[in-house]
Image (cartoon, helix red, strand yellow):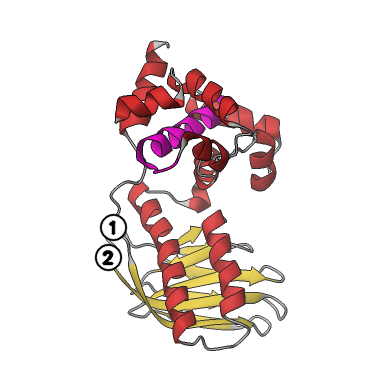
Amino acid sequence: MAGSEQKMAKRLIWGGEGAGRAPLQCILLNAIVCPRAPCRRAPGHSHSFWQIEAMVGGKPGLRIGAQGEEFTPQRGELIVIPPGVQHWLEHPAHGSYTATFKFILHGFTGEATTRILPRTDRTRALLGAVTRLLPERAIPGPLDTSLLEHLVAACMQIYAGMAKRGIDPARDPLAERVKRHVADQRGKPVTIRQIAADLGYSTSHLSVQFHRSEGITLKAYLDWQRANAAARLLRYADLRINEIAYHMGFSDPFTFSRFCRRMLGMGPKMFRAQLR
């Protein structure tokens, strides 16, 4: 392999993203899903707990002002408001459904600022679970509350990671949005066309902007990220090589083996043997 590829492979073998992050704990105070009256506005206020507002369905239009900025989350996005932050809310017209979570959070360290969590597999899972666990205007029971606490904590884990890296989705570079989208796939196959459709861009614009920002083609980045996932599974997962191949979406173990030889410089069996 070329020198740069050898360095990349070494990083894949010994490094993993997001390792060592302590889990957060959530105590849910209130959770509700409901349609809002036309232009219902909550005047400026603050409180001692965390709050998440999310657009669950219907027409968009939720507006939130906090820390000198105005936020307009779209359907499937969540906005996190930390304790002590003065904010106001203007809910959309009747027929739009929003979800509100108020909770206490333990274990968070970092800058607490109002942020939008963009649509990802995790946030979609949270909102999908909300509509099942929390019917309109219902109060969750003890078991549902416990499940919701875990789901909210998972979303706050995303928030904590964004705060640590200084990501602001409202002004987030396109390349960073692509990287998060690819990371959500966890090694599963994803095409440039699929990413472009999900993010609302043409394939040519997405590829050009990513290459200009990162100095690497998007196709090469997708291959290296998939190799990164393969390296972690081969090192840590208690799975047979053919199980890893199918888990990652390869059609058969032979295709997976060829991929490893191309990206890691050796077959998966030898790669795992050297690690162990």
Q: Residue at x 57, y 81 (%)?
A: 134
| 2 or 1: tag closer to the N-terminus | 1
In the picture provided, is 92 more to the left or to the right than 157? right
* Residue 222 drawn in magenta: yes
Q: Which mark is residue 107?
A: 2
Region in magenta: 219-239
In the picture provided, is 206 more to the left or to the right than 13? right
Q: Amino acid at mark 2?
A: Gly
In the picture provided, is 37 more to the left or to the right than 6? right
Q: Position of residue 215 (x, y in %)?
A: 49, 23
Q: Amino acid at mark 1?
A: Ala
Near-viewer residue (167 or 138): 138
Residue 114 visible in the current orientation = no
Q: Circle 2 — which element?
A: loop
Residue hosting label 1: 22
Instruction: Measure how far apart labels 2 and 1 are at the Cα level.
Output: 7 Å
Q: Circle 1 — which element?
A: loop
Task: For label 2, count other residues whose C-alpha is less than 10 Å away and answer few (under 14), some (14-19) or many (20+).
Answer: few
Q: Position of residue 273 (x, y in %)?
A: 34, 26
Assess whether mark 1 and mark 2 are in contact (beta carbons under 8 angstroms): yes
Location of residue 197 with respect to 61 vertically, above or below: above
Q: Position of residue 20 (x, y in %)?
A: 28, 49
* Quarter placement of the C terminus: top left
